[in-house]
């Protein structure tokens, strides 16, 4: 794929460095990371360029896989941090029963929960709990609301827009997500403020997972 034809997300360019700062704090050296809904692949490449030893497994739905694979093929071989690797992307829709085998020390996903239908969110949680190692981390970046309150007018506008497109889309409630995750053995460890009124939620797997 020609570099000019690669999918590109301006938001990724803005948020990749703040996300990296948090991942440095949370990921153990040589962590195996499954990224769900990896989109343009910019996060995968950026993290692998800056996290020594990380083993990053991007994944996407079928319809977005080609662009992601194009970026990983072009940028995923050179210029990575020592020992870091980016695997060829896998096809994964969170509604599928069969996820990559794992175990993974972390599952990472950015700006996906408000895009996928609400009914998919429990499937993302359940699938993550299945493939995470014991004590593994689920890290979710994006906009969230708390109770009936949005954290910013811009997030509210995005929420209204998405729900007009499809009532199943929309900015998720962090407290509801926390409760649903706890039912699956994923317990909130941190809820970090990020630029542009986003959050990074970190859950730890206390179920047996694949590594238990
Ligand atoms: C706004 S894009 C974010 C892409 C990328 N993570 C980023 O930060 O730029 C939302 C992503 O969610 C993915 N997505 C939506 N529904 C999904 C599902 N059921 N399973 C897996 N990924 C899904 C889409 O394919 C899309 O790549």
Image (cartoon, rainbow, N blue to C red):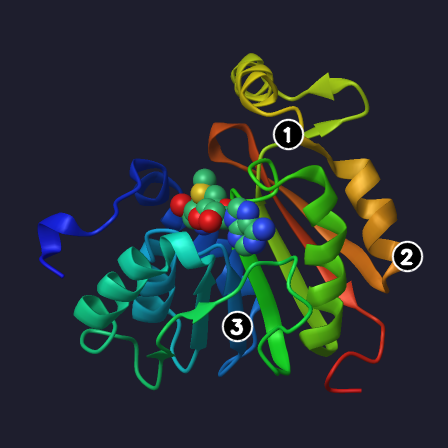
Residue 11: x %, y % from top left = 36, 37
Quick check: 53 above or below 51?
below
Task: Report which residue position mark 2 lands on.
Answer: 183
Instruction: Report which quarter residue 82 is drawn in.
Output: bottom left
User: What is the distance, in whole Å, between disc 2 and disc 1 at their CAs?
Assistant: 21 Å
Q: Residues within 10 Å of mark 3 (few under 14, many from 20)?
A: many
What mark, if any, has residue 171 been given in the picture? 1
What mark, if any, has residue 89 been given in the picture? none
Task: Report which residue position mark 3 lands on.
Answer: 33
Which of the pair 103/79 is nearer the observer?
103
Quick check: 36 above or below 194?
below
User: What is the distance, in whole Å, between disc 3 and disc 1 at their CAs?
Assistant: 25 Å
Quick one: quadrant of the N terminus? Answer: bottom left
**3 or 1: tag closer to the N-terminus:** 3
- Mark 3 in CB contact with mark 2 (< 8 angstroms): no
- Mark 3 in CB contact with mark 1 (< 8 angstroms): no
The local secondary structure at tag 1 comes to loop
Residue drawn 40% across and 43% down?
A: 15
**2 or 1: tag closer to the N-terminus:** 1
Residue 178: x %, y % from top left = 81, 46
Residue drawn 63% across and 28% down?
A: 170
The local secondary structure at tag 3 comes to strand
Quick check: 131 above or below 65?
below
**3 or 2: tag closer to the N-terminus:** 3
Residue drawn 28% across and 56% down?
A: 67
Residue 26 located left or right of residue 208: left
Quick one: quadrant of the C terminus? Answer: bottom right
Residue 41: x %, y % from top left = 34, 58
């Amino acid at each position: 794929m020609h570099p000019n034809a690669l999918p590109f997300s301006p938001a990724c360019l803005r948020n990749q460095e703040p996300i990296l700062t948090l991942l440095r704090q949370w990921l153990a050296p040589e962590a195996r990371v499954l990224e769900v809904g990896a989109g343009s692949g910019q996060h995968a490449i950026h993290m692998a360029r800056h996290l020594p030893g990380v083993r990053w497994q991007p994944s996407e739905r079928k319809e977005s896989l080609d662009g992601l694979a194009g970026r990983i093929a072009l940028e995923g071989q050179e210029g990575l941090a020592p020992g870091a690797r980016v695997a060829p992307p896998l096809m994964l829709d969170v509604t599928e029963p069969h996820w990559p085998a794992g175990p993974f020390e972390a599952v990472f996903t950015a700006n996906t929960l408000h895009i996928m239908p609400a009914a998919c969110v429990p499937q993302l949680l359940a699938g993550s709990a299945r493939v995470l190692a014991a004590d593994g981390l689920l890290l979710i970046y994006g906009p969230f609301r708390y109770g009936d309150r949005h954290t910013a007018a811009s997030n509210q506008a995005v929420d209204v827009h998405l729900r007009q497109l499809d009532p199943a889309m929309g900015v998720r409630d962090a407290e509801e997500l926390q409760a649903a995750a706890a039912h699956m053995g994923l317990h909130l460890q941190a809820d970090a403020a990020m630029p542009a009124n986003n959050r990074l939620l970190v859950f730890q797997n206390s179920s047996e997972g694949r590594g238990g």
